[in-house]
Amino acid sequence: MTGSQDRVIGAESGVASVRRPQAAFALLGTVQVTLLMAMMVIAVALPTIQRELGLDRAQLALVNSAYPVSFCGLLLLGGRLGDVFGHRRAFMWGTAIFAAGSAATAVASGLGLILLARFGQGIGAALATPAAMGLLGPVFPERRAYARAMAVWGGFPIIGGVVGLLLSGPIVSWASWRWAFLPPVLVAIAAVALAPVLLPGVRPSTRQRVDVAGALLVTAGLAATCYSLEEAGEGASSSIVVPSACSGVLLLVAFGFVEARRRNPLLPVVLLASVRRLAALACIASGAAAVFSLSFFLPLYFQQTYGFSPVATSAAYLPYAFMMFLTSSLSGRLVDWMGPRVTTIAGFAIGSAGLFLLGTMSTGQPYFGPILAGMITFPLGAVLIFSGTTVVIMEGVPAEHAGVAGGLLNATIELGPTIGFAALVSIAASWTAGLLDVGIAPEKALPAGYGAALTIGAVGYLAIAMSSLVYIWRQSSRRRAKPRPVPHTGA
């Protein structure tokens, strides 16, 4: 990131001067954390919402999934709209729509209104999130400053989720679930007011068009896929999950065929031509899967095994949150020092150690012991994974594709947890069922299932770290083995 002095930065044609890049980054980062916090803050409030609005289990699942499904489904389209019409404009419109959705959620009196409100939150977030990433280029035009900003940005998705978990318990216990949506409204209103002052007004250098057919196919495909995975995680029947998953896959395949024949595709081929970028997308999906799964297993473990209240559960997350904030504040320097690839590998190695420690919950460990050690170790690794991979994914992206690249990154962060979470929940459920079948008491079988799932996740993390090390070693060996040209001395 840049120094503290104000600088006048000229970026693309039509870009306003950025005199306060740090203030612009703080504004964009605060909104990004708020968008993701609003997705998680509802988790603890779901039982209260169900009672107050008189919802059945299926309706409650819809309320929970409305935001992530609309967010995930519209990210690529939202990114493309920012590239076409300008990132600041897309950011302001998206943030305003998100504010309206959050306010409507807070006052919702029935299923119809709260569903529309949650969909509105997702639509606004899908427009604002990739636009914010597209604005980072003109805010930090120097390559090194941009890489450091991206490294810090990589930790924001995890911070948003943790903040949501920390706030949800006290708000639900001491006030009303409706108050949880007031902070997002206030942040969004302030952001819309400050955006014209702090953010550059980027005019696209070339006139582009939106691929309508591709937009419809990918939006429907991503939404159907995300919905099927969300419902699978909620334990929905196969009559819901299988048709949704199949239709989602077919729509995405059709999207691929359509895009291959377009002159201006919604998802430019150049973004998928890099093996490094594809590998980084797979890595960040794996990292997001572990982070999201922990946000499910740990609260259950704390409440079922230790008997913690929602407030005590939030308090138990404080060491986790502290390490998350500390590592995020240093991530820019760490990536600058080690490079994004080594940072990512170190993140998987440290993260696997944290998951192994948390996996000891299968033996009923007390909080002050391996569990606390894991809650300190894992977030350190997770932030390094997100920071390193974010830099690799956004590195070398043409300015005219920055928004859709940000949409691709965030769609991966959304789809990764749903796939990984479904897999780990299945492992935990199968392990628990096996123990119950042999007569193990439920209070011991449940944490054993959670621990088994986390241990298997740790093995997966370690495998990614080792395979990445082998790949880098082979690449280095090939470079050393290449014969150097002999200088021509003449005769």
Image: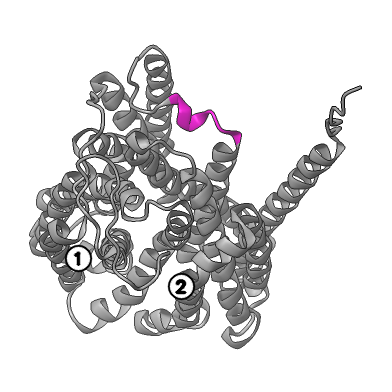
Residue 439 appears in the rendering: no
Q: Residue furthest right?
A: 491
* Relative vertical location of residue 353 with respect to residue 470 in this rendering, above or below: below
Quarter of the figure with the N terminus: bottom left
Q: Say if the magenta span includes residue 274.
A: yes
* Helix, strand or loop for disc 2: helix
**What residue occupies the far front of the structure in this picture?**
491
What distance separates the C-alpha of mark 1 from that of mark 2? 22 Å
Q: Residue 221: name its quadrant.
A: top left
Residue 221: tell me if it is visible.
yes
Residue at coordinates 63% horizontally, 52% vertically from top-left? 341
Q: Amino acid at mark 1?
A: Pro
Q: Which residues are magenta?
A: 269-275
Measured along the vertical axis of the image, is residue 127 above or below residue 351?
above
Do residues under tags 1 and 2 come within 8 Å of each other at their CB atoms? no
Depth-wise, is mark 1 or mark 2 nearer the camera? 2
Residue 10 higher or lower than 375, as above or below: above
Query: Can you identify the residue that label 2 sits on?
Result: 329
- Check disc 1 and report the residue beneath it: 184
Q: Quadrant of residue 240?
A: top left
Residue depicted at x 53% and y 68%? 333
Residue 178 lies in the magenta stretch = no
The residue under label 2 is which amino acid type?
Answer: Ser
User: Residue 337's spot in the image, x, y percent?
Assistant: 61, 64
